[in-house]
């Protein structure tokens, strides 16, 4: 099961991370279109310092194999296939969700509270087959107790955190696509 226990001290926080979702060269399509994304997401460095146990959860997708299979079916370039996957199809995968479920099922220590941080925008409405996020319609969040903030949305620089951990994963990688999440307990 791909997870590693980490210490709070190795989680790299920076308020500027929330600003990375919108810049002159890039604007995430979920920025200001989701209850879980900036500018609506809280900065959680102080709140997370009250938690005691942290687990980095990750999933691995064989991007090289996926590109190979797609090239057999289409005349698209490797660059096109890779970027289309990373920008669209990777959001549809439930692999990280599966890793969270496996981890939480086997976790047997008692805790008072937990915080789950995923990757990307909240997908809880889609997982529940309840439609899209209600943010743009002006309605309140359907599942405010289940909202899924991403690590980046709360101010964690994921790449720097992962690289500092010296995990036994090739990251960044041209062969694999990794997705990261964080489970926090107190």
Image (tube, rainbow, N blue to C red):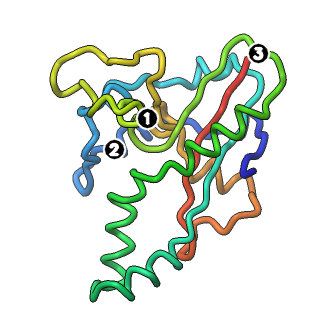
- Residue plotted at (24% across, 32% down): 32
Residue 4 relative to residue 183: left or right: right
> Could one spot residue 37 in this view of the protein?
no
Q: Residues within 10 Å of mark 3 (few under 14, many from 20)?
A: few
- Point out the residue furthest to the front here: 129
Residue 60: which quarter of the image?
bottom right
Q: Residues within 10 Å of mark 2 (few under 14, many from 20)?
A: some
Residue 21 disc label: 2
Label 2's element? Answer: helix
> Which label's residue is closer to the chain start, 1 or 2?
2
- Residue plotted at (36% across, 30% down): 125
- Point out the residue furthest to the right here: 109
> Which label's residue is closer to the chain start, 3 or 2?
2
Residue 50 disc label: none
Residue 124 x %, y %: 42, 31
Question: Label 1 to label 2, Cα distance in Å?
Answer: 8 Å
Residue 14 x %, y %: 51, 36
Pick whichever, 112 or 73, lies toward us: 73
Residue 78: which quarter of the image?
bottom left
Label 3's element? Answer: loop
Q: State if disc 2 and disc 1 touch (CB < 8 Å).
A: yes
Query: Which mark lies nearer to you, 1 or 3?
Result: 3
User: In which quadrant is the C terminus drawn?
Assistant: top right
Tell me the residue that label 3 is attached to: 111
Residue 90 relative to residue 74: left or right: right
Residue 36 relative to residue 137: left or right: right
Q: State if disc 3 and disc 1 touch (CB < 8 Å).
A: no
Total marks placed:
3
Residue 153 disc label: 1
- Residue plotted at (39% across, 25% down): 41
In the displayed structure, would residue 184 be above or below residue 118? above
Q: Residues within 10 Å of mark 1 (few under 14, many from 20)?
A: many
């Amino acid at each position: 099961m791909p997870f590693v226990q980490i210490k709070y001290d190795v989680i790299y926080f920076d308020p500027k991370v929330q600003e990375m979702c919108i810049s002159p060269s890039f604007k995430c399509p979920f920025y200001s279109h989701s209850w879980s994304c900036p500018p609506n997401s809280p900065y959680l460095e102080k709140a997370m310092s009250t938690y005691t146990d942290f687990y980095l959860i990750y999933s691995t997708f064989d991007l090289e194999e996926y590109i190979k299979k797609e090239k057999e079916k289409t005349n698209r370039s490797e660059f096109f296939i890779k970027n289309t996957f990373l920008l669209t199809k990777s959001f549809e995968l439930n692999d990280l969700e599966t890793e969270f479920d496996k981890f939480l099922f086997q976790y047997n220590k008692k805790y008072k509270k937990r915080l789950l941080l995923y990757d990307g925008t909240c997908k809880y409405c889609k997982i529940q087959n309840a439609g899209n996020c209600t943010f743009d319609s002006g309605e309140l969040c359907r599942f405010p107790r289940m909202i899924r903030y991403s690590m980046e949305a709360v101010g964690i620089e994921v790449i720097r955190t992962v690289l500092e951990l010296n995990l036994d994963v090739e990251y960044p990688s041209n062969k694999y696509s990794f997705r990261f999440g964080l489970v926090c307990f107190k």
